[in-house]
Image (cartoon, rainbow, N blue to C red):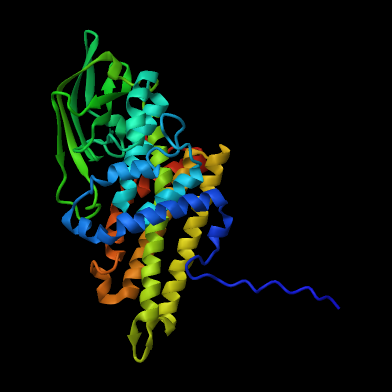
Amino acid sequence: MSTTASPPAAELDPRDPLAVEALLSDTERATQTRVKKFVEREVRPRIAELFADARWPLELVPQLGQLGVLGMHLDGYGCAGASAVEYGLACMELEACDSGLRTFVSVQGSLGMTAIHAWGSDEQRAEWLPRLAAGQAVACFALTEPEAGSDPGGMRTRARRAGDDWILDGAKRWIGMGSIADVAVVWAQTDDGVRGFLVPTSTRGFHAQDITDKLALRASIQSELRFENCRLPAAAMLPRAEGLRGPFTCLGEARFGIVWGVTGAARDCYEAALTHATERQQFGSPIGSYQLVQERLVDIAVAVGRAQLLALHLGRMKDAGTLAPEHVSIGKLDNVRAAQQVARTARAVLGGDGITQSHPVMRHMANLEAVSTYEGTAEIHTLIIGGALTGHRAFA
């Protein structure tokens, strides 16, 4: 007779129902834990107040630099050189607190710093990347315009030659961190097509005005920028970026962060609903003991786990060099809409209190409406995927 003890029976963890954490390496778990502890200590206790007051806490910027999450997926120049999965886990923990927190890291690292790292000169990289990685400076990424959102090729901002200099004129809208940035990565039409420029925000003719009537992303900054006869030296142009490939590369990095980030928002909504369902008493029993509430909890638990698995799979592909832009579109499309449905269902479990700031769900729900639009709407990503499936591009 064997005396070998049987292994303990596996059990489902309500906080990790598909056991996704077991798929992570020790290094990945350490990164996730480090970012989560920072968020819980420094931001979560005051995020409801920041959202209500429509304030981005500028004092967090150097702390995020010390945390090592600014441009963490980049190599050199003070950047962490982390894996795609580590970056994704960081985005997940940041957005579990608030989309505005992850948005800052995305704008700084995936957009501004990626543009400089991928397309800038050695001098531009040396001047800006170490300061941006340390949180000693802030970057913004100016692509979207009042009349050119989903169609960036229709941009009207223009840069024209003036001797050895450039003269920049035009306007951009919905530019994250535009009013607090030290440098703007601005994309403009030229006689040679779309080119990128590094524009110090102290440049004469640069104007930034915040968009203040937002009902989402309130703990964040989005601005409208105007360029009026801004004179830039020849060295301001990003020498390696020609056409829309430059900005699209950066957008792909930001979209990858969103794929992970929204899973954090969804998880936070699910956990709020689960806690409430075990504590809230009605008809003499916790509401979590009733069949219809359990059905809702099961639906959102499965949705969160599935979104996490998709994000992790795409992260593994990115680290292996096998991730195509259309794969990121699948993740952005499906994980955002899954997170939106999780938020709505969690709000229903919370009842009337679910619309108050005493729970994070309504705040996440509002933020996710904005996240569903920026870095490519659901319609645009659907057509990107459809084109890859059929071989027929459905838009110009």
Q: Position of residue 319 (x, y in %)?
A: 54, 40
Q: Is residue 200 visible?
A: yes
Give the position of the C terminus as an image quadrant: top left
Q: Which of the two residues, 258 or 325, is positioned nearer the viewer here?
A: 258
- The answer to whether 200 is drawn above or below residue 334 in the figure is above
Left or right of residue 320, residue 193 in this image: left
Residue 183 figure quarter: top left
Left or right of residue 282, residue 181 in this image: left
- The answer to whether 241 is drawn above or below residue 181 in the figure is above
**Residue at x 36%, y 27% (from the top left corner):** 116
**Count the marks: how many?**
0
Left or right of residue 360, residue 318 in this image: right
Residue 189 figure quarter: top left
Q: Position of residue 163 (x, y in %)?
A: 22, 7
- The answer to whether 297 is drawn above or below residue 379 in the figure is below
Q: Position of residue 243 (x, y in %)?
A: 36, 24
Give the position of the N terminus as an image quadrant: bottom right
Q: Which of the two residues, 249 or 45, is positioned nearer the viewer here?
A: 45
Residue 124 figure quarter: top left
**Residue at x 48%, y 40% (from the top left corner):** 82
Residue furthest to the top in view is: 163
- The answer to whether 251 is drawn above or below residue 206 in the figure is below
Q: Is residue 327 visible?
A: no
Residue furthest to the bottom in view is: 284
Q: Position of residue 254 (x, y in %)?
A: 38, 41
